[in-house]
Image (tube, rainbow, N blue to C red):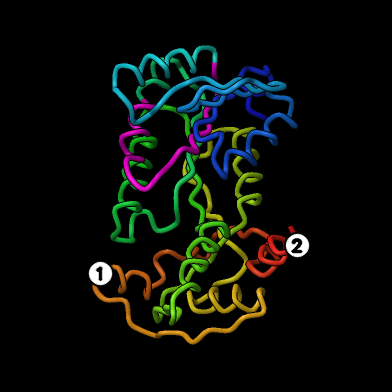
Amino acid sequence: MANTANTAKTPVLVTGGTGNLGRHVVPLLRAAGLPVRVLSRQERAGEDGVTYLRGDLLGDAAQAAADLDAALAGVHTVLHLAGGPKGDDVATRRLVDAARRAGVRHLVYISVIGADAVPLGYFRAKHAAEQAVAGSGLPYTVLRAAQFHDLALTVVEKMAKLPLVPAPGGVRWQPVDVRDVAARLVELALGEPAGTVADLAGPEVYEMGELAKGYLAAHGRTRRQLHFRLPGKVGRAYRAGTNLAPADAEHGRRTWEEFLAERLAA
């Protein structure tokens, strides 16, 4: 069933709309005929159907609240895509408070697979943000996704520059294409609030060494690898596969190899 807020063509607010994921989500919302507001730390000129509103979720608390109140006026649906290495929990709580004041009818949040299981600060903040959304009293949808191909590329590019390419044993990723995640998020935003939905991961699981080897092969290169065991709680969590999609997950269609081929062609 279509979300009544969307059928009325009220503006959709997107946080993180200028980021990697947001740059794919915003055009899809526009293609669905929805006016879009994008919360941005920098002032930007608007474009067809897209309005940029200044706001910093991690800035001064009073200013952030005022900016959010203005951005959320008349908004029924919010896609919260903004994220970073720190502060996702704080930013999300501020957004939730403002969304309650504005009477938002659907808050869609993108999280990460293993948010409640991988003992790293980024994952803990994502889990705290999930809890803030779920406990807000607002109708909501939370989608957990695997790491994007783009992040995997950034990591292996750095690894490939080293004399020996690190290959931590048992550390596996299931990278997903950002376009697959964007399409799923817009589908969810156009529907009714669904709570926590099935995770979304890529179609294949790779050892970190395999990701690096695929990257090097795509560039016609080879490099010796340094195999080692990642220590501590983090190593145990990754070897247990807590960052991988569960059996009931959904899967994107674009593989790591297809992503690399597209990047090389570009």
Q: State the residue in front, 121 or 260.
A: 260
Q: Residue at x 63, y 34 (%)?
A: 191
Residue 58 vertical placement versus 183 (above, below): above
Find residue 26 and report its image quarter: top right
The spot of residue 211 in percent (x, y) is 55, 73
Judging depth in this view, the residue of 170 and 133 nearest the camera is: 170
The residue tagged with tag 1: helix, strand or loop? helix
Closer to us: 191 or 42: 42
- Relative to the observer, which residue lies in front, 157 or 142? 157
Q: Amino acid at mark 1?
A: Lys
Q: Secondary structure at mark 2?
A: helix
Circle number at residue 233: 1
Q: Residues within 10 Å of mark 1 (few under 14, many from 20)?
A: few
Identify the residue at image location x=31%, y=73%.
Answer: 235
Q: How far from the left and from the top, in percent, is residue 125?
A: 32, 46
Mark 2 or mark 1, which is nearer to you? 2
Report which residue position mark 2 lands on. 265
Q: Is residue 93 magenta?
A: yes
| x 53%, y 52%: residue | 198
Which corner quadrant holds the N terminus?
top right
Q: Earlier in the sequence, mark 2 or mark 1?
A: 1
Q: Residues within 10 Å of mark 2 (few under 14, many from 20)?
A: few
Residue furthest left in the image: 232
Which image quadrant: the C terminus?
Answer: bottom right
Stretch in magenta: 75-96
Place of residue 56 in the rendered image (x, y in percent of width and height, measured from the top left): 40, 27
Q: Position of residue 76 (x, y in %)?
A: 54, 20
Side of 9 where 243 appears, left or right: left
